[in-house]
Image: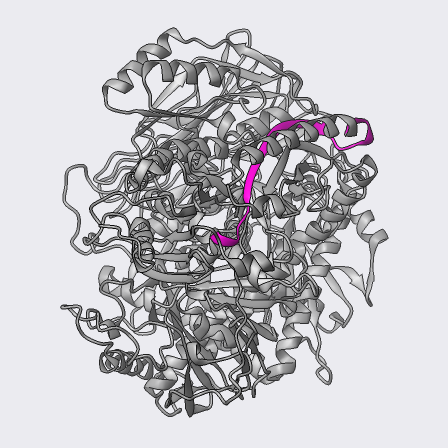
Amino acid sequence: MAAAAAAGPGGFQFAIDRGGTFTDVFARCPGGRVRVLKLLSEDPGYGDAPTEGIRRVLQESGVAVPRDQPLDTSGIEWIRMGTTVATNALLERRGERLALLVTRGFRDLLHIGSQARPRIFDLEVAVPEVLYEEVIEVDERLIPHQPGSTGASLLVQRPLELSALRRELEGVLARGIRSLAVLLLHSYAWPGHEEQVGALARELGFRHVSLSSAVAAMVRAVPRGYTACADAYLTPCIHRYLESFRAGFAHQLREVPVLFMRSDGGLTPMQHFSGARAILSGPAGGVVGYAMTTYRREDGQPVIGFDMGGTSTDVSRYAGEYEHVFEASTAGVSIQAPQLDINTVAAGGGSRLFFRSGLFVVGPESAGAHPGPACYRKGEWPRCRRVPYRGAYFPRIFGPGEDQPLCRETAARAFRDLAARIDAFLAGTAAGARQPLSVEEVAMGFVRVANEAMCRPIRALTQARGHDTARHVLACFGGAGGQHACAIARALGMSRVFIHKYSGILSAYGLALADVVHEAQAPCALRYEPAAFPRLDGRIAALERECRDALRAQAPRSPSWHRNPRSGTTIPILTLRSPSRHCHAMPGAAGRLAVPPRRSWCPLPPRRYMVEFGFTIPDRPVVVDDVRVRGTGSSGISCETPLAPSGKPARVETVTQCYFEEGYVETPVFLLEELACDHTVTGPAIIIDKNSTIVVEPGCTASLTRFGDVCIAVGSGSPRPVGPQLDAVQLSIFSHRFMSIAEQMGRILQRTAISTNIKERLDFSCALFGPDGGLVSNAPHIPVHLGAMQETVQFQIRNLGEDLREGDVILSNHPCAGGSHLPDLTVITPVFWPGIPKPVFFVASRGHHADIGGITPGSMPPHSKALREEGAVFVSFKLVKDGVFQEEAVTEALMAPGRVPGCSGTRNLQDNLSDLRAQVAANQKGIQLVTELIRFHGLPVVQAYMAHIQANAEVAVREMLKGFAARWGTAVEAEDRMDDGSPIRLRVQVDPQEGSAVFDFSGSGPEVYGNCNAPRAITLSALIYCLRCMVGQDIPLNQGCLAPVRVVIPKGSILDPSPEAAVVGGNVLTSQRVVDVIFRAFGVCAASQGCMNNVTFGNERVGYYETVAGGAGAGPRWHGRSGVHTHMTNTRITDPEILEQRYPVVLQRFELRRGSGGAGRCRGGDGVIRELLFREDMVLSVLSERRAVRPYGLRGGSPGAPGLNLLLRRDGRTINLGAKTSVPVEPGDIFRLQTPGGGGFGSPGEGGDTEEAAEPPAPRSFAERGSVFEYRRAQETV
């Protein structure tokens, strides 16, 4: 390869990344000369930026290429491109007009999706609209032959009817729609019906038809349907772009190999480039670029890619293999296809800066390119990027006339205004005695906060999978990355930063290094066991042959393809499920050409499972859901040219004053193009390139590699002393650190737990508490857990007192001890510090256990009348005593409900024990992280900032209450009723001077003979949730939220029942009514469905539980969302294909209940209709509300429709089951659930209040994506 590189290519080689703003071009000319250029993606001076880039390179090389004529391609060896065309079309909803064909009964399946709302505290449920304009329901139905088996055999329950479909398709064509997506249930296993529909559509003249079985042949209808829609929506856009691109070249580029980058990091021929595989086409090149240039196989040190642009920041990881995800969301659309795990985690260098309620806040809004930050002379927004010295090097393109330089004074003026607001706020706090902050201190404070905000997801990306963050190299690229690299690496404990010489165009350079990839996939549904290995071998071998044949057909003309020893390699990938957890395992080592021998199958997937999830399940079956083979044909170039040593010191361009933690420091400035491989630059220093700036901080040393790349050795630096007195910058940093501790506890719990509830559904919370038991940080923000764990910890402090000893861990779930309902087990660890007799802080984790005994499986009985019927009870149980796990005692307690007549002990003891151990381990992680913080800053400082962060939340709530009193008055009240008539009353008295309030629930009904009693902790959680929603911005959710609030709840009421009262319905039903009453009192929005619609069915063989969406309430500026979970729940619904594959039911309908939302100026959201056909004898249980009392409307809006639970017997009878019941069902019976709609807001036809019609909050300026985002989103959907 070195000889080939020296000789250079025979023709021009182009690697081009067409981004949204700039197009980057990397070109190798005949003879080996490299040309790099950057040009605007849109410019009136030329039609297409990549074509223009090629034209300029050819022209510079002496080839005459007039702009108005097609380019001669005779001298071009190949072209490689990455493009954001598909991503931009998806973000901006500018794709092809589209119709969806779907199995009858599921017209709204993709609208409902997972039924979870994306942001739990946003009352306006903003979900991106579906991509299709019309829906056609297709008469056909496939169902599994034998539910619960591992086979994939299907029954045709309803044959395909094409005659009526033909007429409907002709009507769609007549309305101008030419693109179709087809989603038929279970088509991944048998695509026959979809293929017949596709053939008919093409016969009628549809230009593009995306079959879900062809685009993503994987189980789960919802993401497969999204993927098919995205493909049908985007592929025509891509084809139009490719046609216009080819038109700029002679002979339409027929003789030139043109490859495009796919989302998985592999290249594919232009004619195979499609919408579903193009979402990450641009960013994928950057990952390949840093992976191929930074990672060294000889030492195996893993790399974190850090791409900080103007609008967003991407992070990813490479450790010898590309890390893929197989389902990810972009712009609200889930794509079920292999994609590089690129995590867009934060706003970029153009992030806007705010000071809110005492906190420094960076982003997520971006100043953008127009009007841009204050220094652009067109706007007034300060931003977070450091620009220490570039004024003389920036082009004069700013200001209204685009002919002026950057304006330092405008930026300084914006920071002075911001500093004045900060000082005015701090003057009224404990920090008021301090000297006012200078402009430089404010600016540096925002930089430090931005750095800490970006460190959090990097920790999550590494530590979540058991990797040590500090062992990684930080590979920086993007325009702003080099300015923050040293600080971020230092904060993460990394010792090395690598910045490639082409970092400004690394995505384009990565295209030149990338491989051609082809993937083949097939469904499987075999158990992972020796008897199935020969069949797995056969399927893999067939897919490998398909991949190799495709790679040979795609082989470019470059001779390096045939010389490269890695050309034509294949890697088999299995999607495993055990028992309901999905992961992807690679049984063969990368680079092996043959199918791995059977003896290598057994140990490898369990080992991968152990690395990923922290445990193995030796006695449970593992199922292979599908088999995928990834074929790779290596065709990347090698064109590194060594630099010659200069033999003299590096020339200093100039010296400037740059502000660091120590203050202003004289800082030399160097030009990268003048540095040689024998130069070393000691920080502080600035290195300027044509496309970026690198800040070498004090204590760091930069050197150049022999190929001209910058490698920075990161020193520890001198720690900045922090005292216990309030510092606004440190407050923001500690806020991130405390949240990071809770998040990392959650990651440990999720990795080491064994149950589906905790590992897959993520139904848990982890939290950090101060020495008084007051909540400091909590993650994730599950509404029903907010504040409740604080009640539990404070109860233990009162109840155990001196009996809280080092080495003890407490288990509790009783409602009188702050419990929500019995299956939520809370594990609390007090933490001691040498020389201090009492705990200095507490950590706790609360997880939902699938069963802890009681009268019904799942411990969620709809008809319980006493607490003892709901399962095992723990008040202050020592789970660990003197460091020893009390397995025998906790086992006895978990089996104790079996002594109650009609009850059983826990039905899943081993899962209980394993999850309790995982909760103890999560607490230990929290202890480790907090003690590290204490060792660094000292106990007084950490405890002081625990109090400061609670006071900060208090400030935000007080400001909200003052604002409410100024607008609506000082006293409000509201009442609503449960279906049994029990009232829930609330009177709120607000003090407008103090910003405090009394929430008085006196007058609420007495404890009920049933299970809708809500423990006091539930009411507090509902109140914190409502306060956070009404504050309307991110604030720390901790004890401070309730500090301005006094809550009065009468003893013995439905909201504070006796210790023996049943409470399971209070957690899932009454909590929703409490929220409705609070929002009614404040007039915030109409009532949402006010129910979780709990449905359970099962027999001695299987058991299943779900909650079902309804309608959201309308507000002053928004219509209620239809088919979504609201307020105190956000649980995802099981995909129809998974449900039918694992349980003996058929889902016959799942669609919106049109017209069930209340009328109004803003309409309430509609509920849903869900029909289950039973295939075995089972017991059906329903626990619901809002069947008698309708969800209220506000300000003249109509109420939503009540819900209805119907049982359609196979003998023709229809029975109203009522709100709460258990009933035996037989094969052929159908349960029809009709969920409530949301209330309307305002009288129909009237205008809105001018204040209500104010502009909504600014939207987020970057689209989050990647596994870190998906994990957090999953945490908030329980």
1098 vs 1060, nearest the viewer: 1098
Rendered location of residue 1134, percent (x, y): 55, 33
- Please provide the residue range marked out in magenta: 511-532
1203 vs 897, nearest the viewer: 1203
The answer to whether residue 738 is magenta is no
> In the displayed structure, would residue 144 be above or below residue 1122?
above
Rendered location of residue 1210, percent (x, y): 55, 9
Image quadrant holding the C terminus, namely top right
The answer to whether residue 518 is magenta is yes
Q: At 37% from the left edge and 81% from the top edge, which residue is drawn?
A: 388
Q: Is residue 54 left or right of residue 28?
A: left
Q: How many tags in the picture? A: 0
975 vs 333, nearest the viewer: 333
Q: Kindly indicate the quadrant of the structure image that contains residue 748.
A: bottom right
Q: Is residue 655 left or right of residue 1116?
A: right
- Residue 1077 appears in view: yes
Image quadrant holding the N terminus, namely bottom right
> In the displayed structure, would residue 869 be above or below residue 1041?
above
693 vs 48, nearest the viewer: 48
Q: At 75% from the left edge and 55% from the top edge, which residue is drawn?
A: 917
Rendered location of residue 403, percent (x, y): 17, 71
Q: Kindly indicate the quadrant of the structure image that contains residue 247.
A: top left
